[in-house]
Amino acid sequence: MNLEALYELRTRLEDSAIAGIKLLAEDFRLKRAVDKIESYTAAAPVFKQIYDMCLKLTGSADNDGESKAELLLDVLALVDAVLCTQGGFYSIDEKDNLSYIDTSLNSGETFRQFPYSRLKPVIDAFSSQGSGRYAIIANAHEKEPEIFKDFRMKYWMVYALGDSYSETAQMVEGWLKNEGKGICPLLKKDFDPKGKKDMVRRLEIISEISGEEENDFYKSLVHDADAAKEVREAAIHALRYDPANEELLIALTGSEKGKCKEAALASLSHMNGEEAMQCWKKAISKKPEVLSALLHSSTRTWVGVLLGEQIKKQLEKLDSYKNIADNKETSGLKKKDIEILDALWDAFTGKAVPETADYALIAYKYIPQRVVNSLNISMIVNPDKLFFDTAERLYKEYKDACAESAFAADLLTMPAVDVYEKYKEYFNKSIINHIIAVKKDETGIINCFIRLKYDEDKKCYMLACSKRNHYIKTVEKPIFEALDIRWYDLLLNYKNTEAKRYTNGWNLYGNAFYEMAAQLYNPFYEGLNEMYGKFFYNHALRKHATPEHVRLLKRCDWKEYKNILSSLDVSKNSKTANSYYVSELLKELPMSSQELAQELDKLLEKGRDIYVGYRAAWREWSDKLKNGAGLDEILG
């Protein structure tokens, strides 16, 4: 039921319970929420009852001597009961008349109805405090995404934008950005320009969804003298969508300071007028290392030209150091100029100008990693021929050091057979047979494979990279043609899967190389199941197995799971030596109760030095499994 006013009333009542009943009569927000409920009273007697109780609570009606504390608890309980049981949807027109919305026909994805029992665990997580809530919400969205179509959940998703745990707020923000324009009225409802980060998030979602359609809303916030600085900054950023804002933005670059001035400059970079270009030309000449970051998201041609001019100047300046005696002072100046070049090149990402390759060949001497990373992103976000030519020229000049970019460029532009034939020499097959004959460094090729995955929904291989705008996000592009199947033989027989560069950090497979291999799994390629099964089964036995290992083995129709559990490292202080980890593997392993009990017994034999509580749990599980108990029974 679309009871936004009732949700608001509950929030105000809860706030009043915290603030104290002595302040009830002075709480104008509560009175406003009560006034909104009046239009509901004709729909059902329960709304009339809630309204009358609230009038007594706020002093607008005689409370017959009833304790306000008790009355507050009673009305809160009644409001909760209504919200828990109502499943229809209502709307309020401009005259505050309540009407029922028929959701049985032509409702699309705007409204959905689900039993409240399915929503309650997530709503409780949204509305409560403390740890563990993030996992509940994230897991529900992954396993039951449909319940988030219920209008009651939309309210709590918007509410979560102000969650004290920023990771929850950021996660929900990403979901809401995929909701479409239907969510914007709820985001604008009760929008408080004086608010904090939750209002900024609302505004950023609205602007990303609606673009220039909400330009008047953005301008009203920019001109609101009482609006919070962060809200005005976000509103100024949102002005970038409408070209008609160029004059206003130029004025703001002169009148604003700090972050708001930077926001005005950033939005101005999305305009296409001569005045915008001249304004930026003047600004960047003073602080290129600071202001260039504001040009990162712009796709205007003049921005690329402007950055190219600045890069050319910086490269000439760096070249001049060869004629200056090297000392502590010049070394410091050169380091500073390299940092400026690095900032400029970062902003240059995705900007295709005729001189791109020429600049890249020189810039690589000073900022090699930045040039390569920028090029890898550029080929995906703006697949212009200039970037592919740049990758080829860098490869010819700097050889294996630039192999990743060249390989990525060829994956995106060449037939699969040609790509394989060109790069197969990087994986000398004789090494697999223990003959030392290293001719080339295959690291760059592997780094590119790590960014590649097979998308089963799209039925194609996607090459990904991380792109920075106002935040970091992953962008991806399909490669030219499906990966040549011969790559799998080379990769799954690779000589150095345990190299240190693949083992840093935690991931689903305990190793970046194995995660890469899992991402490349293509269920439609004949003959891969046996190869993948052996590859991941052997790795699970050598290293600690993860639930993801087992899930992939099941997808490959693998039949052998013996010793996967018992091969875990359960020595003291091992991260797998705990009951949670063991229980997660038990849930995934497709083995009989007796087989699982045997695995636990082997684990008990190995784990003599670990915490006694874990061993006691494993012994109990083993005994119960031997007596015919199921996993659901022993693990709860």
Image (cartoon, rainbow, N blue to C red):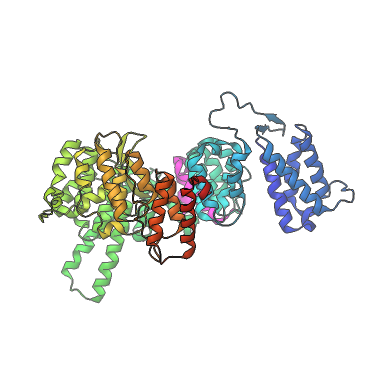
Residue at left offset 26%, top offset 34%: 525
Q: Is residue 375 above or below residue 527?
A: below
99 vs 321, nearest the viewer:
99
In this rendering, would 135 be left or right of 409? Answer: right
State the image coordinates of residue 517 (x, y, percent, origin top left). Answer: 28, 46
Q: Is residue 401 above or below residue 526?
A: below
Is residue 244 covered in magenta?
A: yes
Farthest residue, direction bottom: 328
State the image coordinates of residue 33 (x, y, percent, origin top left). Answer: 72, 45
Is residue 564 covered in magenta?
A: no
In this rendering, would 507 be left or right of 135? Answer: left
State the image coordinates of residue 535 (x, y, percent, origin top left). Answer: 26, 47
Q: In the rendered image, is residue 354 in sight?
A: no
441 vs 328, nearest the viewer:
441
Q: Main secondary structure of the magenta part?
A: helix
Residue at left offset 24%, top offset 45%: 408
23 vs 147, nearest the viewer:
147
Q: In the rendered image, is residue 577 in sight?
A: yes
Q: Which quadrant would residue 600 be assigned to in this image? A: bottom left
The segment highlighted magenta reads 226-254
Farthest residue, direction right: 64
Residue at left offset 53%, top offset 28%: 108
